Amino acid sequence: MANSKYAKLIATATTVLCILLGVMFIVCCVHLYFTGGAQPYSRERVGDYLIILAVPSFLTLALVVIGIVFNVVNGKSDVEPTARTSSELLESFTKKFDPKDFPEEIKAKSDMERDKRQVYSWLAFDISFLLFLLAVLYFDFFTSFSIDNLNGDVVRALMGILPLAILAVAVHIPKAYLIEKSCQRELEILKNSIKENGAPRVNKTEDSKNGVDYALIGRYLIVGAAVALVILGIFNGGMGDVLDKAVKICTECIGLG
Amino acid sequence: MKNVILKIKNWWAAHAPTKRRLIQLYSALLFNSYLKGYITGDIFKGMSKNLCTPGLNCYSCPGAVTSCPLGALQNSFSSSGKTAPYYMLGIIMLYGIIFGRWICGWLCPFGLIQDLLHKIKTPKLKKSRFTRVLSFFKYVLLVLFVVVLPLIYMLHDFPLPAFCKYICPAGTIGGAIGLLINPGNEGMFGMLGPLFTWKFALAVSFVVGMIFVYRLFCRFICPLGALYGFFNKFSLFGITLDKSKCISCGKCISVCEMDIHHVGDHECISCGKCVGVCPTKAISYKGSKIILPDSEIESAKTEEEKAAVEVKREKRVKLASRITALVLSAVLLFSLVYLNFFYDDGTNIDPDQGVGDTDEDSGDTEDDNSIPTGSKIGNKCPSYDLELVNGSGTVNIKEFRGKIVIINFWGVWCGPCKQELPDFDDVANEYDGEVVVLTIHTVTNKASAPEYIQTHFPSSKMLFAYDVPLTSEKDMYFHLLGGKSAYPRTLVLDEKGVIQAIFDGKATHSQLIDSIEAIRSESADTQ
């Protein structure tokens, strides 16, 4: 009991310090940049800020080590498994009991829930597709790319496209929620039916398909294509280009700019 | 005492590194075995950089001995106008079909960093519907930053590895920090600006996030994982499910910390956590048929025969593991010893010693000749005959005594170099007759230089020359003037050929003007 209290205390303190340290690093970096003038980052200025960050850094490191040692001494804590979602439960349930084998009334309700889920999926897909089209339109009509103002052009383009892209992904969150609820309802209907009417016949397990063969053929095809591309790439100078780039420091790639 | 020993034994039994952890550590060390790079403050330039690390490992990291597949892919797209990106597409496909996302779980150095950060004892964000949906965001980043943006700028003949430049934290952490901590790279601090501020803030956010979210980068950001995920179902390595044994208990999905829908799908990194929890042993690693063919397994009918087959299989697995471990250890040892103690990167030039003429006939005074030749500010810049790009002869900075000289090292393959050239052109025009701007193109891609210059600077007052190997291809005039591996680099010389300013990275118009005016005012004061 006392151990778990200490463990929680260490975990909380580590959490707070890690977040605080991260924020401090970011704030210091931004402050350095905005107060530095023409050359914001010099070794001396960076050194001054690192001195400020030294104490919280060491504190955080010490707490991390204490946390690890504490956990070591008091036994390994396993990661708690996450609860199964309703859709996973429904999937494994329907592997045993086919909804088609239930009474007509139950089958109709089950079909209705399945239709609802399809509607949610298609709606989400349509909205995503619409947003994707909007992104393409924005890209075509409202963006321009030049070398003179490279970063500005890229940022401006992303400011329009990224929110649309994020929305296109995010629209699947309510879809997932609605599908989850629908699966919950269908599962309840089927389980209640079993309680009242007894279990229908159990499904036979599926015979293994010839998918293994397709996978093997696909694998051979892809390997062949990949090897051919690599050989082509060696002869057309692609490999040499990789080496040429890799032996020079890509300053902008590592943020030196 | 006995209790202490027992506790230590129990602790070791519970915490001994797993095979997966050992393989992760091994691959991180193997792909970054050029430890000397951290001491010299420069990157590895050997031929092994023709090959790509399977996982994310920035090639601008001082220790990296291979290329990053993601960076190389973006660069291939950037130069796809001239060279079709067959090589990188083939490499990605080959890695994908052989390993799939097994790379993410077992070979990727950045994955190891995330696993270790996640061990810090804090509350953790569990996977949910939200994280499952968010896992598709990496496909958006793949399309936008890895494919679309590099291809768009390819049309402008401008290389833009957009993911590396704007997002990738591996480059910031491994490359930038790795280079900046070296005392010899003080000049690089001058390169830091808004991009570094953005990338550093992003990298710190990722690092903090990785502590609370399992494999934050792999799940939501990494385009390489997104690419490999397409091949996961067909890959040779990975996790497979025997559907005939599966009872759909769902324990595999519950215990998995990635956002899988089922075992072995595009999110599965084959970490193997599910293998241990499956009650019917329906989950296994692919490739087991390599150890024992189907015919031998199927021929076992009785329980005794099955047990014998199992024992045989285990023996073969042990033997194969031992041989593999021996071979791989030898490879790592060889790599570490050879690269750090015997490898000669071909650079023999000491910039402070200087090679080249001694200005005997330059007409300098005795006082001027007392200034040491070198590559630092205050040194006299060594001179060398350089071939002009237009083929009209050679040029030597000695010819420009009495004028301010700006020497700029650049390359057509280098985006920032191309961005700053117009500023140099403006300076050459503004100070015509007083300032000479000499741009020196690298040996790399030099065949493309004349066309680029003709297209963009047809009547420029700048002089365009090629860099020249002094003792070898790795000892160029660029290295003699103190350059390591970072382009562009600019030196500003006064009328006597003494270096007055050095710019590592892009030099802005105002920086050039300030340097010129400083030299002019000093000359005026002296007179």
Image (spheres, grey):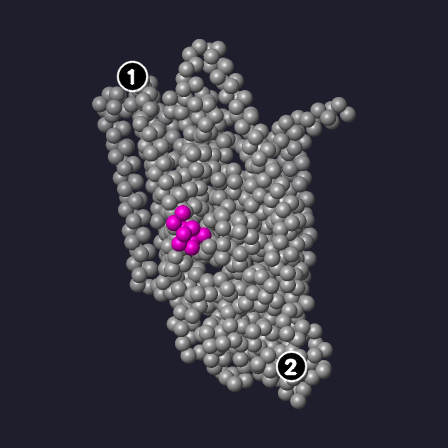
Q: Which residue is mark 1?
A: A201
Please state the horizontal and vertical placement of residue A120, each as a whole percent of the image. Answer: 29, 40
Report the predominant secondary structure element of the magenta stretch. Answer: helix
Q: Quadrant of the N terminus of chain A?
A: top right
| Residue at point 53%, 80% (across, down) | B436
Q: Is residue A234 magenta?
A: yes
Q: Residue at x 44, y 68 (%)?
A: B449
Specify the quadrant of the image occupied by residue A84.
top left
Task: Please count the marks in the image.
Answer: 2
> For this view, does A39 lie left or right of residue B78?
right
At horizontal 42% and vertical 63% (from top left) the residue drawn is B158
Tag 2's secondary structure?
Answer: loop
The answer to whether residue B419 is magenta is: no
Q: Which mark is residue A218?
A: none
* Residue A151 quadrant: bottom left
- Residue type at mark 2: give it: Asp
Compare residues B218 and B526 and report the one nearer the observer.
B526
Circle 2 packing at 10 Å, graded few (<14), some (14-19), many (20+), is: few
> Which structural element holds mark 1?
loop
To which chain does the residue with label 2 belong? B
Q: Marks 1/2: CA distance?
A: 103 Å
Camera-nearest residue between B469 and A65: B469
Q: Amino acid at mark 1?
A: Arg
Please give the range of residues in magenta: A231-239
Q: Position of residue B47 (x, y in %)?
A: 53, 51
Q: Which residue is nearer to you in this view: B125 or A149?
A: A149
Find disc 2 in the rendering and name its residue. B361
Measuring from the top left, give residue B120's x and y in whole percent. Answer: 60, 40
Q: Residue at x 38, y 60 (%)?
A: B82
Q: Is residue A171 left or right of residue B404?
A: left
